Amino acid sequence: MTLSPVDPDRYIGTVTLVTASQVQANLPHASAHPERRALAKGTVGDFVFVDCERTKLLGRIIEVKIPDGERLSVEPHLGRSLNPNPIGRIQLLATLTDGDTQLARGINSYPKIGDGVFLAGAEVLALIIGKSATRPNEISLEIGAIEAGDRRVGVQLPPEKLFGRHCGVFGATGGGKSWTVASLIENIKKHGGKAIVFDPTGEFCDIEGIDTVFAFEGGISNTTQVHFPYEEVTEDDLFSLFRPSGQSQGPKLRDAIKSLKLARAVAGSAPAGLFITNGIVEKAGRARAPYFAAVTANAASLHSPKCSFDIQNLAEQIKSECVFGSAFNNANNFGDTDKNSLSYCETLSSRISTLTNSRELECLFRAGGASLVNELEAFLADAERDIALISFKEVRFEHNTRELLLNIIGRYLLGIAREGRFRDAPIVVFLDEAHQFLGRAAGDEYGSVKLEAFGLIAKEGRKYGLTTVLATQRPRDIPQDVLSQLGTLIVHRLTNEQDRTTVEHACGDLDRAAAQFIPMLAPGEAIIIGPDLPTPLPLRIARPKSPPDSKGPQFQNHWNDRLKAKCKCDE
């Protein structure tokens, strides 16, 4: 530490009032006289150090005013001979420790009346925060810069502080959220990390640092066409897609899945008495004992959560399951077709046939391009590739396809994380426009299934080395149990009061005074909050070398072209 936090040349005032969280101070140099405006010291947003003799406190000016009796002293004509005496309120943030070189959360010692207040220099502030967050010889990411007056000094944080407890990037349209995500991706690439980016709009496909782009449509340049094989999907995912009613259709669907798994398990060597025709297990009038004996012998295959069967036979197998449990005159055989059950399941069979052959769900049920599972396995094993992007731009909205597909991929990643794949090689997963996917359910009033794969990643992924970065412009739509798991928040401008309240409730470090700055943040500015940071920190986020394509509608170009075309027609 070569710089002192208390510089006599930066003195701005004296403490006059002390409360539990704030102090009031005289700020004699805060008024902006025309002849010495550039010399004014002490404006809202400035960081200051309060000198308490043995300790020093970091604070931030949140209000500057003059007493009511002196309000006319600043009028150009009335106040020529009067000198205003501004006073300010300062929010206390943290305590300097370890020889005034590190910041500790909380206030260890309160100031006394008469203690001095000094402006915090950008270099000193950046040095103290950097030393508080990092240790010698560890990797640090430069995420932005502290601005103090006309100075701007970069701030670096280690990846554990940013991603170790999950991260949220919040901000209204135009606040700089996409640039922050792009900057974080570039930092991961630069320092040898590994990440997977889920891109709903395709705006990150062309940024530098992306090694591989996976798309669910063919014919897109510089992308690898993939599909997610339904064999890797769980039965719960199929239930969320096919939406069977709980009392009648649900049990038949489970029985049909079990029978089709059995058909595949005994393919080519079906035991005597078990009749399988064109992949369909026949039950009506057939003996019960061979079926249940085969189920017992192949229990391991049947209890697998994955869908290892021919999905094209599922609709017909459901019809085959609609039989009585035993024949009327022979308890050893299955009964004949139960027409009531068959009629109840007719809508389910029709829905399954429609969905498995639909254009929207080709990404699951038709093998177009490579298997995303195989491609992700190759990416994770490839030491040369760092960043993979999965584009959802071409995925359809019908049948909740986007939400279901993302939930399926998230569940797959969590599954391999539980196997211990990421314990020694942690990976970061980015989800942009997270409000479109989290807290959703697929189904109708008769039955629905929560799509909570990324919620589970937020709750338990950290201990497996799988962490996530959730980016959204609507934090109020993110479930509270997921928000509570986000350790680090990067908050850009939020104009909606409900969004600000949601963020304030989700983070105990962001009090009402600090939250007042959020609606006034300029594009590219953000407040970083986290349990590993000594204080909410306002930064100018580093501009990415390759900004994402997040332009809105081009009204000027389009309207000018139309005007020119109309003028030519008039001529």
Image: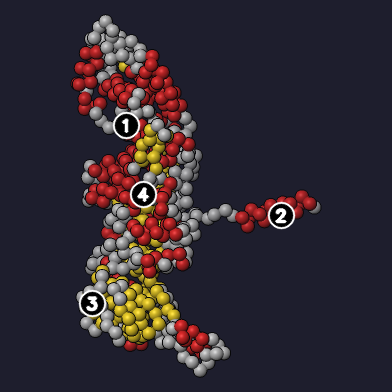
User: How far from the left and from the top, in percent, is residue 549?
Assistant: 49, 54
Q: Quadrant of the N terminus?
A: bottom left
Q: Which residue is under mark 3?
A: 109
Q: Indicate the amino acid at tag 4.
A: Pro
The tag earlier along the polypeptide, 4 or 2, is: 4
Q: Residue at x 22, y 82 (%)?
A: 54
Residue 391 visible in the snapshot: yes
Which of the two discs, 4 and 2, sits closer to the camera?
Answer: 4
Residue nearest the viewer, comparing 72 with 425: 72
Check disc 4: other Cα within 10 Å, few if <14, some if 14-19, many if 20+.
Answer: some
Q: Indicate the amino acid at tag 2.
A: Lys
Which of the two discs, 4 and 1, sits closer to the camera?
Answer: 4
Q: Which residue is under mark 4?
A: 479
The tag earlier along the polypeptide, 4 or 1, is: 1
**Residue 255 — which label?**
none
Q: Is residue 271 left or right of residue 49?
A: left
Q: Which residue is under mark 1?
A: 235
Which of the two discs, 3 and 1, sits closer to the camera?
Answer: 3
Q: Is residue 258 left or right of residue 79?
A: left
- The image shows residue 500, relative to residue 376, as above or below, that is below
User: Residue extending furthest front?
Assistant: 69
User: How far from the left and from the top, in percent, is residue 438?
Assistant: 38, 46
Callouts 4 and 1 close, C-beta under 8 Å: no
User: How far from the left and from the top, in percent, is residue 55?
Assistant: 23, 79
Distance between the Cα atoms at labels 2 and 3? 70 Å
Distance between the Cα atoms at labels 4 and 3? 38 Å
